[in-house]
Image: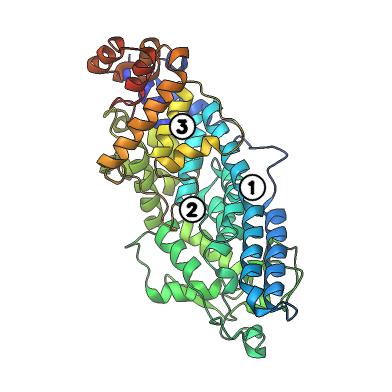
């Protein structure tokens, strides 16, 4: 018989927070509950309001082109130009905002209602690992479809296929400016077709650097600046289709390999020579990066830090990295190595919840509905973790020290108080507490909830308790 706290660890650490009845359903061994979630295809987010990246970007590019043409219009008086430009920019923003809201609501609804919360947690883990941020133009409209199209379908597949899908998605190419990267000896450069007065022409290393530093090898993973430059040249031509402009071609808004921008010739990356096979050259480098020992170690460390402890136990990291290498990056095998490690169950409440974790677990535990509109988005902004807005390709931090400051805690307590005032009269906190926290429920919290002056205060004390804020 395993420790009774394992059901609470399964639901709250490996899942997204227990709902009433979950701990009883999981039982004394959470391993089988987690293994069962790995069977079958990953859940798909669907809805008439969720559009493809191709459609979103094609329309966005059209709106931006209209904006650029408006700027150049000689028919407008110079005194009115500023107002016109501002109006056109607002038009693009107005187009993207409802797309963003619909995507966040669909994601939030899935997180609060899913019967496979471990799969949803690893989906959000990978979305943060391969982070894009909505503070860049078009990404407000593309961040959600990027997660739906490139990440969700592959979280139970291989890391290699996930990596390839992510790096060739228009959202990542736009976010890291690879569509602007031009090989210095490419056909386009030789013909002078990319000369623009206010844009620097040449190699853009953003995508290559972030793939090595953040997506695969990690800092200290054995690559050099020479490798970054060579890889950036390999990735020239990885671009997006458009039906207008000097490089018109392909499906507007869809990935396209533009051979005229590609740097010709073989390239050496990490002591391996890659022949110039066009798009195949980049695919070959990505597949080799996915097989590197440094990649296995980097991914294992991040997974163990996310699920187990801010200071990842070395033994668990080694086991997960070994599973990654032996299975050639088969992700279900990697996940099983993670949650089958005995050390992963030894420290209840070792992780401080991020704001997103905290909000989702409260919605799940209190059976709160996620309604359409911007209302459900406000807590994420209030508590400092707006969806898909980490502000950098590094994604959101994953250590308690980044989230448990005094100001942040006050905001959580204030939000918990608002939740208690709103639904406390319709929830019995004393009954909910053991169902949500199981063996992790402390005597202090149990007593405080039982002695609360009102139902609203009891619920606030539960949601604001130290053990509810941890997983």
Q: Are marks 3 and 2 in contact (CB under 8 Å)?
A: no
Locate residue 338: give its quadrant: top left
> Label 1 to label 2, Cα distance in Å?
20 Å
Name the disc covering residue 130, or none.
Answer: 2
Dot label at residue 99: 1
Crowding at label 1, few (<14), some or many (≥20) Cα neighbours within 10 Å? many
Would you call the spot at circle 3 few (<14 residues within 10 Å), some (14-19), or many (20 or more)?
Answer: many
Residue 33 horizontal/vertical position (percent)? 47, 23
Front of the two marks 1 and 3: 1
Which image quarter: residue 88? bottom right
| Screen quadrant of the N terminus | top left
Residue 437 drawn at (x, y percent): 35, 20
Mark 2 Cα-neighbour bin, 10 Å: few <14, some 14–19, many ≥20: many
Near-viewer residue (451 or 360): 451
Q: Residue at x 61, y 77 (%)?
A: 262
* SS of the residue under disc 2: loop
Q: Is residue 328 left or right of residue 451?
A: right
Q: Is residue 378 left or right of residue 265?
A: left
Q: Is residue 410 above or below residue 79?
A: above
The residue pinned by badge 3 equals: 360
Count of number-bearing discs: 3
């Amino acid at each position: 018989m395993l420790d009774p706290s394992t059901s609470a660890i399964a639901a709250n650490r490996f899942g997204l927070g227990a709902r009433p009845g979950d701990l009883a359903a999981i039982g004394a061994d959470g391993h089988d509950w987690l293994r069962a979630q790995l069977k079958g295809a990953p859940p798909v987010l669907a809805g008439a309001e969720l559009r493809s990246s191709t459609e979103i970007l094609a329309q966005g590019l059209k709106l931006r082109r209209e904006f650029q043409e408006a700027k150049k219009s000689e028919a407008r008086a110079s005194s009115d130009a500023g107002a016109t430009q501002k109006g056109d920019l607002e038009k693009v923003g107005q187009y993207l905002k409802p797309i963003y809201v619909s995507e966040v609501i669909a994601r939030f609804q899935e997180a609060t209602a899913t019967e496979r919360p471990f799969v949803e947690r690893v989906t959000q883990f990978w979305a943060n690992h391969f982070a894009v941020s909505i503070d860049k133009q078009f990404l407000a409209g593309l961040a959600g479809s990027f997660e739906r199209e490139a990440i969700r379908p592959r979280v139970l597949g291989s890391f290699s296929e996930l990596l390839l899908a992510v790096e060739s998605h228009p959202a990542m190419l736009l976010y890291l400016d690879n569509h602007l990267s031009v090989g210095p000896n490419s056909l386009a450069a030789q013909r002078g077709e990319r000369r623009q007065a206010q844009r620097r022409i040449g190699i853009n290393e953003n995508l290559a650097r972030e793939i090595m530093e953040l997506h695969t090898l990690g800092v200290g993973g054995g690559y050099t600046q020479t490798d970054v430059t060579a890889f950036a040249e390999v990735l020239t031509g990885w671009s997006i289709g458009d039906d207008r402009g000097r490089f018109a071609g392909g499906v507007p808004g869809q990935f396209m390999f533009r051979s005229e921008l590609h740097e010709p010739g073989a390239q050496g990356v990490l002591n391996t020579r890659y022949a110039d096979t066009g798009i195949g050259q980049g695919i070959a480098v990505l597949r080799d990066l996915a097989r590197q020992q440094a990649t296995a170690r980097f991914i294992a460390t991040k997974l163990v830090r996310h699920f187990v402890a801010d200071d990842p136990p070395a033994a668990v990291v080694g086991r997960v990295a070994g599973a990654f290498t032996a299975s050639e990056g088969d992700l279900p095998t990697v996940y099983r190595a993670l949650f089958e490690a005995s050390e992963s169950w030894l420290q209840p409440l070792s992780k401080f919840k991020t704001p997103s974790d905290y909000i989702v677990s409260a919605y799940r535990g209190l059976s709160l509905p996620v309604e359409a509109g911007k209302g459900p988005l406000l807590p994420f902004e209030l508590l400092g973790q707006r969806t898909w807005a980490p502000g950098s390709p590094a994604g959101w931090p994953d250590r308690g020290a980044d989230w448990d400051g005094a100001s942040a805690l006050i905001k959580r307590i204030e939000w918990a108080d608002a939740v208690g005032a709103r639904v406390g009269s319709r929830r019995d906190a004393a009954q909910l507490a053991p169902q949500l926290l199981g063996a992790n429920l402390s005597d202090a919290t149990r007593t405080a909830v039982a002695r609360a002056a009102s139902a609203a205060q009891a619920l606030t004390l539960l949601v604001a308790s130290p053990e509810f804020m941890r997983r």
